[in-house]
Amino acid sequence: MFYSVTGQILFKDEGSVAVDCGGVGYLCLSSYNTTCRLGAVGSVVTLFTHLNVREGSMELFGFLDKRELECFKQLITVTGVGPRAGLAVLSHLTPDKLALCIATGDVKTITGAQGIGPKLAQRIVLELKDKLQTGFSDEVVTGDILSAGVASQAGASAEAISALVALGYSQSEASIAVSRLDSSLTTEELIKQALKAISKK
């Protein structure tokens, strides 16, 4: 019903933003990853939206980019994951990091989201793994991470270490994990196997 809303920011906090569209203020619930990137109150913003209709209530969810919106839509298709849980996951992980967690089965990292336990995190991985190609695309899994100057470094191992550091792991932790793997693997495989090894610790 609502594709997007564009207007001045009337109010914002960590989990919501109110946008003035032609004199009507729309309150959009959102992730911290979106709200922390918003401009100041009074600035103009466009949010891509999803209207969630439940018995007796309607809630509008808004995100700064389509990728996060699509990720949110995929999350709420998972059994037991409602809109608030979806926001919790996207407040803890960017779509890129979540896609990597799903691709590599990194349940532990997903449980860092508020209210997401091991069983629900495992369900997210299991139910969304087959949707990676259509829901998140290959670009989400590796493209953005490698494009941020990583691809210019020599060797798949160096690229994998830099990618892991970009994901928030320490240089030493990333180096140790990658050094234990077969150096003939591709960068993508090194990243996936290193994440699996780190998550088992």
Image (spheres, rainbow, N blue to C red):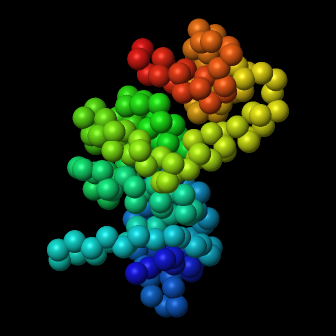
Q: Residue at x 42, y 30 (%)?
A: 106
Of residues 152 and 5, the one drawn nearer to the viewer in this rendering:
152
Name the quadrant containing residue 28: bottom left
Of residues 120 and 7, the one drawn nearer to the viewer in this rendering:
120
How many marks do you count on the picture?
Answer: 0
Q: Residue at x 46, y 71 (%)?
A: 49
Horizontal and vertical percent position of residue 118 = 28, 32
Query: Horizontally, is 140 left or right of 161 in the view?
Result: left
Q: Residue at x 38, y 28 (%)?
A: 108
Rendered position, 78 above or below 192: below
Image quarter (top left, top right, bottom left or bottom right) of the N terminus: bottom left
Horizontal and vertical percent position of residue 184 = 68, 16
Residue lying farthest to the bottom in this orientation: 22
Task: Say if residue 114 shows up in the picture.
Answer: no
Horizontal and vertical percent position of residue 143 = 66, 43
Rendered position, 21 above or below 152: below
Q: Residue at x 27, y 73 (%)?
A: 53
Query: Horizontally, is 85 left or right of 200 in the view?
Result: left
Rendered position, 133 above or below 67: above
Task: Say if residue 46 shows up in the picture.
Answer: yes
Residue lying farthest to the top in this orientation: 180
